[in-house]
Image: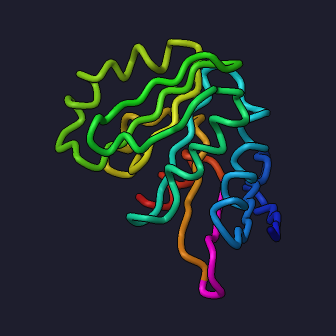
Amino acid sequence: MRQEIFVIPGLPGQTGAVDRRSHCENAADLRDLAEKRGRGLCAGAVLALSGPLGAGKTEFTKGISAGLGVPGPVTSPTFSLLQEYLGGRLPLYHLDFYRLEEAGEVLDLGWDELLEAGGVVVVEWPELFPELIPAEAAWVEISPHPAGGRWVREGSWAEWREAAE
């Protein structure tokens, strides 16, 4: 796995943004990268995972789960919408917004309670309801790499929203 870190200068009086990019050659590299991130997560962390279908968002979540010490397999919440994993250092709440049509459906899943539950929240397809994602969330974009494998770009959700507007 190859990593590059870019510091983007901020405006006067602001700190610069950090844009971290990694090339993961295979699913194992992707899980290893995420496991390292998972080891450093604190209660209340929110990760917004973006990328096309099949990019590796659930594989990334498997690595986060391993970093949190969550036992057992991690599966995609595409049809269940929410998977809860307990038994690790922190609870892991894994959501998939792909099949949801309006923000009220996310709220009906207990979104606000999950954010307050003291665990780690991982959201696939956050761009469908960006207004629900806390500004302090971490943003991870996973996409196919032209040389094979996956390109993983990490930054802040607030910066992603600002760029998208």
Image quadrant where residue 81 sits: top left
Q: Position of residue 120 (x, y in %)?
A: 58, 26
Specify start and end residues of the magenta stretch as a single range.
146-154
The residue shown at (66%, 44%) is 63
Query: Measured from the top left, where is residue 101 in percent x and y?
Result: 17, 44
User: Quick one: quadrant of the C terminus?
Assistant: bottom left
Tell which residue pokes out farthest to the left in this image.
101
Q: Can you say whether 117 is above or below 127 in the image? A: above
- Indicate left or right for 57 with 132 as reference: right
Tell how many labels.
0
Q: Quadrant of the N terminus?
A: bottom right
x then y, percent, for residue 105: 21, 31
Q: Residue at x 50, y 32 (%)?
A: 134
Q: Does the magenta stretch include residue 157?
A: no
Q: Residue furthest bottom?
A: 147
Image spot of residue 31 (x, y percent): 67, 52
Residue at the image point whose x is 62% and y is 28% from the top: 45
Q: Which of 137 and 94 is in front in this view?
A: 94
Where on the picture, by quarter, is residue 107?
top left
User: Would residue 158 appear left or right of 68 to someone viewing this image?
Assistant: left
Q: From the viewer's perspective, is residue 25 above or below residue 77?
A: below
Q: Residue at x 46, y 62 (%)?
A: 51
Q: How is the image coloured?
A: rainbow
Frontmost residue, 80 versus 72 = 72
